[in-house]
Image (spheres, rainbow, N blue to C red):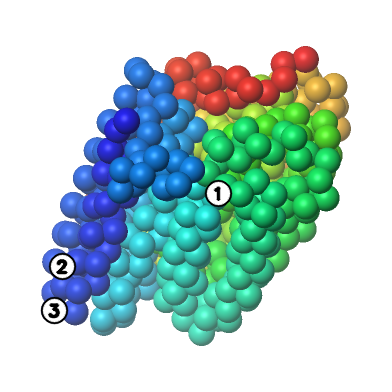
C-alpha cells in the first residue's frame, strides 16, 4: 500500500482551484501556484517511479475501501512511466511564457493555468486509476479542459474545438457503453477483478461489443487514422502551449488506455487471438503513418505541418500495439516518451518564431537559422529525431518497431516505417534548408529577428537536451521500465 498515486494527483487538483481563484486578482500568483503544484506532483511521480522499480506495483484504496467495492489507484511500471512523462512535459510547458505560448491578450491567461492543471490532473487520473468508471470520469475531465483550452486560439480555434467536442463526446460515449457492458457481464468495475471474471465470458457477444466500443472510442481520442479528423484543426489553431501539451501527452493517454485494456483487463490472448483487434489496429496505423506523412509534406503553415505529423507519429504507437509482440510494443511505448519530447519542443519553437517575428509559413523562414541560433539548433535536434537519426531518441523507438515487425514477419510494416522516415526527412529537411542555407528574406520581420528571451529558449533547450539524453539512456528505460510491462505478451 502506498499513497504516492494520490500525492501525484492531489497537488494538481488543489493548484487548479487556487490558480483559478487567485488569478482573478493577480495573474502572477496563478503562475507561481501552478509551478509549485506541478513541481510537487513531479516530485511525487519521480518517487513513485523509483518505488515501483524497487518494490513493484503500489496500490492505494480510496477511503480505505478495498476493491471491488472501493476505487483502487495503482502505480505499476506502465502507469508510473506514463505519469512522469505527463507531469514533466506539463512542468516544462507551463514555464513557457504566455506571451509566446498563448498569443497572450489581457486577462486571457486567467483561466489558462487552472485549465492546464485540470487537463494534467485528468491525464494523471486516467493512468493511475484501477477502476473502469473512474477512468471515464478523468477522461471527461481532461477532455472538457482540452475543449476550453483550444478555444483560446481565436475564432477558428472555437470551431475546431466544437468539432473535437462532438467527436470527443462520441468517443467518451463509446467507452462508457463498453464499460457498461463489462459491468453487466461481470458485476464489477475494478480492472483486476474484471480481468479474473472476463475469460469465462470471452465468447459472449456483450463482451465482444464492449472490447470493440472501448477500442473505437479510444481510437478517436488517439486520433488514429481514419478517426483523426478532429486533430489537424484543433492542433493548428490552438495556441502553441496548448497544442504542445495536446500533441505531446494528451492523445497518447488514449493509447495507454488501449494497452491497459489489452494487458490488464481483457488479457493479450483476447485482443490477439480471439478477436483480431491488434491486427486491425496495426494495419490502420500503417495507413495512418503514410497518410499523415504525405499530408505534412503538403502543408505550408508550420503548425499545421506539425499537426499532420502528429497523425503519423501517434500511428507509430498504434503500430506497436498492432504488432502485439514484446519488441513491437516496447517500440510503441518508447515512442510515447520520445514523441512527447520531440513534438512539445517543436510546438514551443513554433510559438517562439511567431512571437518574435509574426511568421508562421515555412516559406517565410529563410535566414532565421542565423538570427536565432539557439532555438534553431534545438529545432535541428528535434527534426533529426523525428526523422529517426541516431543518437536522438526518435531512432530507437523506430528501431524497436522495425525489430518487432521483423519478428512478426511483417515486412510491409518495415517498409512503412522506412518510407515514413524518408517522407519525414522531406518536410523537415525542407525547413532546415530554409533556415540555414537559403538566402535571408527581405521581410522586415526576418531582418529584425533576434534570439528570443531565455524564458522562451530555456524550456526549448531542456526538451532538446532531453531528446539526446533519452537516446543515450534508451537501453536503461527499456530494461528497467518497459520490459516488465510487455512480459505478458507472447514471445513466439
Give the residue at x 64% y 58%.
180
Which percent across, then down, holds residue 354? 42, 66
The furthest residue to the bottom: 155
Name the front one of labels 1 and 2. Answer: 1
- Residue marked by disc 3: 25
Q: Nearer the viewer, residue 368 or 66?
A: 66
Residue 335 horizontal side relative to residue 420, left or right: left
| Label 1 to label 2: alpha-carbon separation | 42 Å
Q: Is residue 358 shown above or below 366?
A: below
Give the residue at x 69% y 49%.
185
| Label 1 to label 3: alpha-carbon separation | 43 Å
Q: Nearer the viewer, residue 11 or 453?
A: 11
> Badge 1, how many Cα within 10 Å: few under 14, some, many 20+?
many
- Residue marked by disc 1: 189
Secondary structure beneath dot 1 equals loop
Q: Earlier in the sequence, mark 1 or mark 2?
A: 2
Residue 28 - label: 2
Amino acid at each position: 500500500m502506498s499513497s504516492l498515486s494520490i500525492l501525484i494527483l492531489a497537488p494538481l487538483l488543489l493548484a487548479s482551484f487556487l490558480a483559478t481563484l487567485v488569478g482573478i486578482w493577480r495573474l502572477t500568483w496563478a503562475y507561481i501556484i501552478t509551478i509549485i503544484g506541478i513541481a510537487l506532483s513531479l516530485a511525487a511521480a519521480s518517487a513513485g517511479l523509483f518505488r515501483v522499480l524497487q518494490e513493484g506495483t503500489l496500490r492505494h484504496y480510496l477511503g480505505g475501501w478495498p476493491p471491488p467495492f472501493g476505487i483502487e489507484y495503482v502505480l505499476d511500471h506502465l502507469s508510473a512511466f506514463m505519469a512522469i512523462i505527463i507531469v514533466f512535459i506539463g512542468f516544462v510547458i507551463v514555464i513557457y511564457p504566455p506571451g509566446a505560448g498563448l498569443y497572450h491578450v489581457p486577462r486571457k491567461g486567467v483561466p489558462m493555468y487552472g485549465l492546464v492543471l485540470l487537463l494534467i490532473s485528468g491525464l494523471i487520473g486516467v493512468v493511475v486509476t484501477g477502476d473502469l468508471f473512474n477512468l471515464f470520469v478523468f477522461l471527461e475531465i481532461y477532455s472538457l479542459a482540452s475543449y476550453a483550452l483550444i478555444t483560446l486560439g481565436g475564432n477558428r480555434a472555437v470551431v475546431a474545438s466544437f468539432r473535437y467536442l462532438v467527436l470527443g463526446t462520441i468517443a467518451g460515449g463509446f467507452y462508457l457503453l463498453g464499460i457498461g457492458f463489462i459491468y453487466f457481464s461481470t458485476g464489477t468495475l475494478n480492472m483486476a477483478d474484471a480481468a479474473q471474471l472476463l475469460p469465462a465470458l470471452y465468447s459472449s457477444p456483450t463482451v465482444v461489443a464492449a472490447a470493440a466500443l472501448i477500442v473505437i472510442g479510444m481510437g478517436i481520442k488517439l486520433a488514429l487514422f481514419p478517426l483523426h479528423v478532429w486533430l489537424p484543426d484543433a492542433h493548428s489553431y490552438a495556441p502553441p502551449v496548448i497544442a504542445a501539451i495536446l500533441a505531446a501527452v494528451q492523445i497518447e493517454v488514449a493509447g495507454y488506455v488501449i494497452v491497459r485494456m489489452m494487458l490488464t483487463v481483457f488479457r493479450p490472448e483476447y485482443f490477439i487471438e480471439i478477436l483480431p483487434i491488434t491486427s486491425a489496429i496495426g494495419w490502420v496505423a500503417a495507413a495512418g503513418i503514410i497518410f499523415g506523412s504525405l499530408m505534412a509534406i503538403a502543408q505550408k503553415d508550420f503548425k499545421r505541418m506539425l499537426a499532420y505529423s502528429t497523425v503519423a507519429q501517434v500511428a507509430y504507437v498504434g503500430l506497436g500495439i498492432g504488432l502485439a509482440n514484446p519488441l513491437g510494443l516496447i517500440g510503441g511505448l518508447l515512442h510515447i516518451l520520445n514523441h512527447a519530447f520531440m513534438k512539445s519542443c517543436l510546438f514551443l519553437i513554433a510559438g517562439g518564431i511567431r512571437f518574435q517575428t509574426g511568421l508562421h509559413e515555412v516559406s517565410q523562414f529563410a535566414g532565421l537559422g542565423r538570427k536565432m541560433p539557439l532555438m534553431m539548433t534545438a529545432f535541428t535536434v528535434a527534426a533529426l529525431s523525428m526523422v529517426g537519426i541516431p543518437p536522438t531518441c526518435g531512432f530507437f523507438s523506430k528501431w524497436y518497431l522495425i525489430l518487432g515487425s521483423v519478428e512478426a514477419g511483417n515486412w510491409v510494416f518495415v517498409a512503412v516505417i522506412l518510407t515514413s522516415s524518408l517522407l519525414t526527412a522531406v518536410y523537415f529537411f525542407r525547413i532546415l534548408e530554409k533556415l540555414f542555407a537559403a538566402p535571408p528574406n527581405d521581410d522586415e520581420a526576418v531582418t529584425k529577428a533576434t534570439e528570443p528571451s531565455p524564458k522562451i529558449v530555456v524550456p526549448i533547450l531542456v526538451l532538446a537536451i532531453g531528446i539526446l539524453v533519452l537516446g543515450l539512456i534508451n537501453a536503461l528505460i527499456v530494461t528497467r521500465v518497459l520490459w516488465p510491462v510487455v512480459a505478458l505478451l507472447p514471445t513466439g
